[in-house]
Each structure stands twice: as C-alpha cells, then as structure tokens.
Amino acid sequence: MNAVAISLMLLLATLAGPPKEAAPSAGDLLAQGNQVMREGDAETAAGLYAKAATAAASGSPESQGSADPVAALAAFNQGCAQSTLGRAEEAEKLFEQADRTTVDPSLSAKARFNLGHSRFTRGMAAANKEPAEAIETLKSAAAAFRAALEADCTDRDSARALEITRRQIKRLGDAVEQQKQQQQQKQKQSQQSSDKLDDLAKRQQQLADESAKAQQQQTEDPEGSAKESQRLKEAQEGLNKETAQALDEIKPEEGDTDTKDAAEQVRQAVEQQKQAKEHLDQAKPGEASPRQADAADRLKKASEAMARAAEKQGEDQQEGQDQLKQDKPGKEQEQKAEGSPQPKQDPAVSQLLDKERRERAERERRRKQTAGGIEPVDKDW
C-alpha cells in the first residue's frame, strides 16, 4: 500500500527580541532554535524551543498581555522538530497546544494541518497490519484537516489533504469489508472440511469393523469371504481417493496450527489407507482392519482440528466487526461535532470545538469577504 504524501508545514518564524540580557529571552531561544533547525539539528532545536516556551510562561517581556505569541510559536516549532525526529505522539500534543494557545488564525490552521499530517502518517503506517485501527486514526486525521479549513477556508493544502484522507478511509473500509467476506468464506470451507473428514472417519471405521468380521468368515464361508474381500477392497479404494482429495482441499496458512495439524493427521491417514488396501489386495482383511481403524482415528482427529480452526476464524471475524462498530461514528456524534467528527478518546476535542465556536462569527465574516474560497466539505467520509 503506497502512502499518499502530505507535506508537513514548518513555521520557523521569529519575533524581534528585546536588547540582549544576561539570560536569553524567549524570543532569543526561539531564534536560536530556528537557526539550528535550519542546519538540520532537530534534537537541539527541540530543546531550545522547549526552553523558549518555559521562558515565555515564566513572564518574559514578550509574554506580557492576554496572549503570548512566542509560547504558541515555540510549541508549534517544537512539534515540527519532534515530528522530524519521528516522535509522533509528542509532536501531536505540541501541535494541539499551539492551536489552543494561539490567537493567530494562520498559526492555528498550520498547527491543525500538521496534527492531521502526523495522524495521517500513523494511520497509513498501520494500514496493512491493523486496517481497522488505521481507519480510526485516519478519521482523526480528517477531523484535524477539516478543523484547519475551519480556521482558514482558503487553505487548499488542507482541502486536498482532507480529500486524500477521505479516499484512503474509503479504500481501507472496502478492504476491510472484502477481508470480512474472505474470512466468512474461509470459515465456511473449514467447517465443510470438518464435516467431510468426520464422514470419512465414520465410513473408514465401518470398513475396519467389516474387515474384522470378514477375517472371521474366511474359514466358515471361503467363497462368500472372497466376494466380501473384493467388496471391501473396492470400497477402500474409493475411500482412499476421497481422502486424498480432502487432503488437497486443506490449505494451511502461516500461524494456523489447527489446520496444519489437520493436514498432518490426514496425511498419516492416507498412509494407513494405502497399507490397508495392500492387505485387501492380498485377501487379508484381518491385517487390513487395524490399519483402517488407525486411519479412521486420524481422520476423526483431523475433523476436530478443522472444527477448531473454523471456530477461531469465527471469533476473529466477530472481533473485527466489533472493532469496526466501535470505530464508526454515529450520526448523533457527527452532528454534535458541527460536521467535524472527532474520536471520543481525543482529549483535545472539547477544547478545539469550544475555540471554534468562539471564532465562528469571525470566520463567517472572513468567508463572505474571501473571493474564490474553498467550498466547505460536508462530511469527512
């Protein structure tokens, strides 16, 4: 599965710092972090941005007032540095922090975009191994991209990223549905194989009992015993063919120990049947009977193993369905999120929505004044 590239925005903006003092100001630390970030040292830059945020919070000259632009910029840039270092969870927390603390709609849009980018990357990385989990992560990415559009309706990067994410959610959802159908078919085949092997085991045991009786009749009725031996030989020959066919239909997959066990039991049953047939060819039903009984026992064990495989496949299928039900947002949840659904476990949801409500009037005013703006997307998937 090829991941779709979505560019990560880096905002290495600086503020004019005050005259140099003994201790670096928040603005100085921010500028130093920007410089080393440009030089490719994301680790050092992340540390400098963290110090800038601490300095801003402690009351540097830039932080006086109702809002601190340095703190928001420091959180944003630190998030970019952590993302560069591959620390997605830390980066996402910092982008959320930047969005909560800034009063600049442009920075808010960029923070939300980067948050969506990080979630998108995580979701695509999990797509092959955990498609249901990947869908959930991609839904949260779509919510972040949509929130970015709410902050800046002219942001074409966010609009494009949202559409890409929606398509990936659709594609993965189709893949999960196809996988579910394949699992249902596999379970059905395993159960059918179990039933077939059980029937073979019963018929094989019946032949074993009949062979034992035929041995006793050889001295009492030689002519009748010869006819019975011929019938038993023909019946065993037919049973051998059916068992070989049943073995061909068992196709173990990696990690499927029950199906592998079933296949091994059937292979050993086939060997016992061959030896039984050889004894019957020689008109020795008494010697064939133990071989037939052993084959019947192995076929019974194979049937039980395939039944276990079918049961486990059914459990795996149910688990996948339960996961998808948990991941799928309901209509009520979508309506409460004002068309921008977020997973319930996201701790930033309420803060983001509260902030969006306060900014709604300003956004509506800017939309009316913007020519050629991007049409809002009704749904994320």
Image: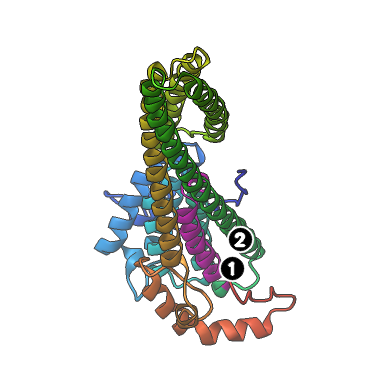
> Residue 303: percent from the left, percent from the top?
41, 39
* Residue 148 falls left or right of residue 354: right
Is 162 in front, or is 381? 381
Q: Residue type at mark 2?
A: Lys
Q: Residue type at mark 1?
A: Trp
Local secondary structure at mark 1: loop
* Residue 69 falls left or right of residue 227: left
> Residue 252: percent from the left, percent from the top?
48, 33
Q: Residues within 10 Å of mark 2 (few under 14, many from 20)?
A: some
Query: What numbered label is drawn on residue 170?
Result: 2
12 in magenta: no
The quarter in which the N terminus is drawn is: top right
> Residue 51: percent from the left, percent from the top?
31, 50
Local secondary structure at mark 2: helix
Q: Quadrant of residue 46?
A: top left
- Return the disc, 1 or 2, that comes first in the chain's sequence: 2
**Residue that protrudes farthest toward the right in the picture:** 372
Magenta highlight range: 125-149
Label pair 1/2, CB-CB below 8 angstroms: yes
Is 195 in front, or is 187? 195
Give the distance between the C-alpha atoms of the residues marked 1 and 2, in whole angstroms: 7 Å
Instruction: Tell me which secondary structure the magenta stretch mostly adopts.
Output: helix
Location of mark 1 (residue)? 381
